[in-house]
Amino acid sequence: MFSPYGRFIEEGRGFEIFTPDIPRNWYNYFFTDQYVTFTSQCGIGQGFLQDSLGRRISPVSARALYAVEGDAGWELSGLPLYDKYEDYKCIHRPGSTEIVLTRHGIRTGWTLFVPPESDPFTGAEVSVVDVENLSQREREIKLISYTENDLDGAYKYQGYNTRAVEKQADFNGLKLDFNEMFEGKKRAFTFFCFCDRPLTGWDAAKNRFIGPYNTLRDPIALHRGGCTNSACVAEKACYALETAFTLKPGETASCCFVTVLTANAAKAEEMQRRFRSAEDAKNELKALTERIRSATGGGLTLRTPDENFNCLINNWLKYQTNLGSRWARVRHNGYRDIASDTECLAVYDPALAWQRIKRLLSYQYANGYAPRTFIDGQIRDNNFSDCAVWLSFTVYYIINELGDAALLSEQVPFNDGSIASVWEHVKRSVEFLHGFTGHHGLIRIWGGDWNDCMNNVGIKGKGVSVWLSIAFVRAARMACELAKTVGDEATARTFTDWAEDMCRRVNEYGWDEKGGYYIYAISDDGERIGASDCEEGSVFLNPQLWAVLAGGLGAGREEKAIKNAYALLWDELGTRVSTPPYTEKNAWIGGIGEKAPGVQENGGVYLHAMCWKLAVDALRGDSKRVGEDIVQILPFTNPVVNGRAEPYSICNCYMGRETGYRYGTPGQSWRTASGQWLLKAMAQFVFGLQPSLEGLRIKPCLPDSWNEACAEKEFRGHVYKIRYLRGGMSKVLFNGKELSGDLLPLEDGEVTVYI
């Protein structure tokens, strides 16, 4: 069975979950440029509005929908699990989630989505509810929408809540007015919720609706017959809206509930006009769904022998990449995260990627340094040293996709307001890192690099990252190519020299002769990390991979490093990111020693790194390992994971063997670069669709088990329809004629690749 809990439907654009009772919540995300929310298959989630410096206001910290009949009620999400239901399904789609439930002869369908909104001070969520009487008698059913937030202050035992919320006579819902810092100044905000139908009840006092001793899963209102029209004064507020239906046997009805957070005084009236009926809401959802399908359906389509994999690649990974490029890891606006995800976005939507990277560049310092994140109204450096290195990669690939070097002249501000060209931003990032050196002239790790948990290794300013020094080589080489496109030959020569100098330093000081691979770092005190003589953390995957991704380090050691590291890091679950895991006795290195052995970067199978491995194995032409990598990465083909992770999203890691009962269980879904890099690795390296300024080159490395595959790629206004065939030969035909190389003509064409 593909998954014991669900299946792809609607040509992969939907994923149907069969039961709410799965090992953990399987989430879905919806977003605009300023608002993001998520929900699980049981309706669990939260949402928030964010300004350009990461200030956040959360209008939804918990949500629920209930049906009430007489003095009994039930939740419309499948919870609590002990309350039996007659039928259930949840359908996650890019942009919406639908939960269908039958209890007590009443069938309900709850669809949640975030409507498009251009106003930067407004975010909204819409719940459309359909209700059907499946019984043979008339039914009186109340529907109640419940929203919770901390806009009036967090609830604490013996806490202090002093605000007031009550229904206003001229408004079919509840409102709360408050002031909050947003986009640089204190602004008057309103949170409001309303229903498209007349209200038969409401509650604003949490203790009246939930009860002082009850929970969200079993509020006291369900045992009292519904809402009691309670105002809230100087206690914790909630927002419960009730409407009622009388349904004859077989009769159906619909309504919609809308929650809005806004600093725009006109939005209350506008939103009520916009969602006058459930039909209006359904029309908005239909238009939104079509827009998302259009955005994710174009640019790139890959067809493998595995139809489930096709559903994941061509719908969900694109959606996950778009989310990451705009919202990073959601919990914060990671600079490196957005840059890397935007690099991946370029494989199918380079025009949007270009807008996203220019936005990100505006947070960069004028000296070329890039911060770790921006959150809570501040740009925060957090002592991370690697963020600047990702800019060259992203700009390089977007320019190669678009083929327009003139874009590098576009002007973008730094975070101090000074303005420079995109090329100047990239140039300064390389120059900054070249001057940011410690031991042996390698790049300083400071408070962490890609491995966030190496945060104490170089905090004194002397420790260095061998991985980052290798990544610098890659960045300098890509920036060199960009320099040539703008005619800056002097900088191109300088960056070439810097890259070669760094290669020599890495080979001299970063190579472990005994282990036959590259070490990870050297601490402030000169201790080598990731070396064969280390008791813990004696080998790391990433330096070996990036030696290949950087184009080689000049000493011919890459294959030896790969072979030796792979042998030490292999596990049935996948290739571990490091081994042996650290214990607390090495907590001086940083957070990596505080994580349990086998968890995430500390000896787990980190899927971001596994996707880099997939790219590297394809670059190396190792088709056998490419096939193995794909099987281990995918949650529905990895035999150890065995379907326990969301099949429509790629998580950050699988827990390592040392975690015992957690072995093979998934880490965090969505909030990771793993899915984004799987999309890029498949398109650019496995299918070999490699953009260059000259045009699209094709250099595939498909798994041995694939006898045939297909791709469609939009490139600079042209469409390539590509078929891959295994036939014991190696050649490329374009519109029936054999090409002399791997560069495709810049015109529409049918391509046949024999492998």
Image (cartoon, helix red, strand yellow):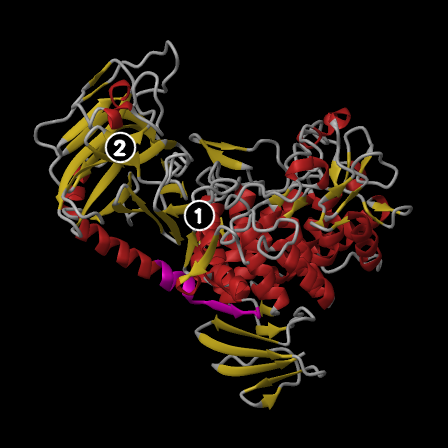
The quadrant of the picture occupied by the C terminus is: bottom right
Name the residue located 27 percent from the left edge and 58 percent from the top edge. 286
Judged left or right of residue 673, residue 237 is left
Which of 43 and 349 lies nearest the eye of the viewer? 43
**Around disc 2, counting alpha carbons within 10 Å, would you say few (fewer than 14), some (14 to 19), or many (20 or more)?**
many
Whether residue 620 is situated above or below residue 356 in the rendered picture: below
Residue 612 placement: quadrant: bottom right
Residue 296 part of the magenta segment? yes
Residue occupying the far right of the picture:
514
Q: Nearer the viewer, residue 74 or 499?
A: 74
Magenta stretch: residue 76 in it?
A: no
Query: Residue 463 location, x and y as percent?
Result: 75, 33
Segment colored magenta? 292-305
Q: Could you say which disc has been placed on residue 73 in the image?
A: 2
What residue is disc 1 on? Answer: 326
First in sequence, mark 2 or 1: give its number. Answer: 2
Q: Secondary structure at mark 2?
A: strand
**Depth order, front residue of 481/515:** 515
**Amino acid type shown at disc 1:** Arg
The quadrant where residue 177 appears = top left
Query: In the image, is 611 to the left or to the right of 250?
Result: right
Determine the residue located farthest toward the top in the rendered image. 158
Q: Position of residue 108 (x, y in %)?
A: 27, 46
- What SS does tag 1 mark? helix
Q: Measured along the vertical axis of the image, is residue 717 above or below residue 556?
A: below
Identify the disc placed on residue 268: none
Task: Tell whether 697 sits left or right of 506.
Answer: left
Q: Position of residue 456 (x, y in %)?
A: 70, 28
- Between disc 2 and disc 1, the foreground one is 2
Residue at image position (44%, 40%) is 417
